[in-house]
Image (tube, coloured by chain):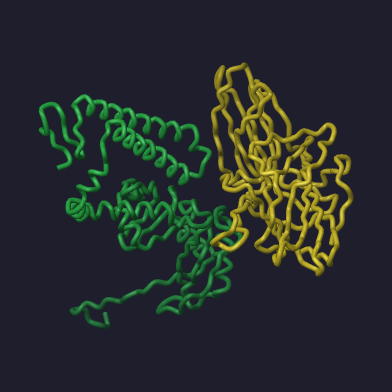
Chain colours: A green, B yellow
Amino acid sequence: MAFEIFGTQDTINVFGTQLSTWSLIVAAIIMTVGVIIAKVASVFFKRYFAANLEVNTAKNLQKLIYYGIIIVTLLTVTSSQGIDLSGLIVAGGIFGIVIGFATQSVVSNLISGIFLMFDRPAKAGDLIEIPSNNIYGRLIDITVFSTRIKLFDGSIIRVPNEKVFTSEIRNVSGSEVRRIDCTVGIAYKEDVDHAIQVIKEELAKLPYVLREPEPAIWTEQLADSSVNLKVLTWLPIDDWDEVGPILVKVVKNALDRAGIEIPFPQRTIWYGNTPKNS
Amino acid sequence: MKTVDSISPENVTNSIKIKNFSKYGRYSVKDDLELEFPSTKISISRIDNEKFSYKRTNSENESINKIISAKSPGFGIEVAPVIPVNLPKHKTDFLFLRLTEKLFLNKNSSAEIVIPLPIEIGVFYIEHNKAETFDFFTCDPLHSRYGLYGPPEEGILCKYAKVSLMNANEESPFVYAKMRVFVHNELDKGVSLGKIVFPVTDHELYYKDTNVLVDNLKVAIKHRGALELVEVIQDTIQKPNGWTKSPTHRHKTDHKFSMEKGFD
């Protein structure tokens, strides 16, 4: 066993090395100091240097600093206390296989996390969608084991990196603009070109609707009771809230003001006990 | 193609109906102040010893109210033309000018044109002779629009305006500044220039009363490898005597910008 607490009266066997209680205390102190230094260095970097770097780069560098110091401290502890890690390798064998099976998902998430950091399908702050998991929100961070996404209801969801890595990811913030669309039906008697003109003029009043590429409106379908027009507009990526919630209302109001009818299916109901001629 | 006379401050005349609109410049506010610009009114009034009320009514009859805390008995404001990147939100430093009529240039030829540069008006709080950004407005809300230069997947978001070539006598000092553009076609074929995209934050604006001047622009249509592109760079003008430089509050790029995604 790697740790034999009762190896002798006042020594402990760690990976085959006999360590005194005092050595262990020194090792624990060095490790604690190392963790504190790692934390301080990480916070110092975030406060004074991260602001000048791209968000994702800053986060990755911060993690590198933190875990780098931890690893250096761990190596310092083992070498200063004369712990021979080759014992661990020898002790591996079947024990390692057992641990491997037990931590399969942990290792998988770790490896996926490392790959995600290199692959960078999205960066912190991007709006992403993972369709297979029905997740849509703003990416907060990709950590070593999991990805944190802030949903629109304000809650934060933690998704294991393995799931993220093997899923399709839709990055909505991939470019500077995005498109939104809606469909509106007008009556068959109406002039389609006139309706398109009316909608275009109204969209031109919305400051966040891009002038180039200009809004596109076309006849999408000759439906059962209406001629359906498809309205597509482009807007700056972060300004969906300025247009998305009001687009349909703006189009409807414009058509109403122009006297263009928006038809809807109507049904006449005859009650069984009502004479038809009544 | 229109050619223009040189634009010196003496040549700048206000053919627009300026009526009794307020002038650009610094104002000292002791108690009350009222300023009027096309479609916009600003009124500042004292509330108590250390507070003033600021109210701006814009062209869409929307009212913007702020409280100004001023320790001294009064304070100063500066009303100045600024580059058009602040409204409705600051999202980009680039300006996309779409020419309503394309400019045709024969091979290896040059032209000098004047195009209107849409401007916004900034209200700055002055303390210890330093201007702090306070409010922005536009006398033509149609200029507060965005456009994309390039395809959606890799385009650059820009402020957008449709403009046509001007002549030397045209003026619209609260809406446009006249920008002189030197265009040179280095290609061995004729081309049409339909748009100009550039980092507008590199441009300085100067004002005097109601008149506005802006740095010039150099536009070179050239080859880079197999690509035909337009290189755009700001061309600084000398500040004329008696004119004031508008406060700058945006970072300058000071580099040549290449329009590599088309120019027709």
* Left or right of A22, for residue B198: right
Task: Name the image quarter holding the N terminus of chain A.
Answer: top left
Residue B17: in sight, yes or no?
Answer: no
Residue B72 x/y as whole percent: 61, 17
Count of all numbered marks drawn on residues in the image: 0
Residue A170 x/y as whole percent: 41, 60
Residue A84 x/y as whole percent: 26, 39
| Vertical position of residue B26 compared to residue B232: above or below | above
* Left or right of B10, for residue A30: left
Residue B207 x/y as whole percent: 77, 37
| Vertical position of residue A188 compared to residue B204: above or below | below
Q: Residue at x 41, y 32 (%)?
A: A41
Q: Residue at x 25, y 83 (%)?
A: A276
> Residue B137 lies in what quarter of the image?
top right
Residue B112: in sight, yes or no?
Answer: yes
* Left or right of A209, for residue A157: left
* Left or right of B105, for residue A152: left
> Residue B110 lies in what quarter of the image?
bottom right
Q: Residue at x 26, y 26 (%)?
A: A26
Task: Name the image quarter holding the C terminus of chain A.
Answer: bottom left
A265 or B166: nearer the eye? B166
| Vertical position of residue A171 compared to residue B23: above or below | below
B64 or A142: nearer the eye? A142
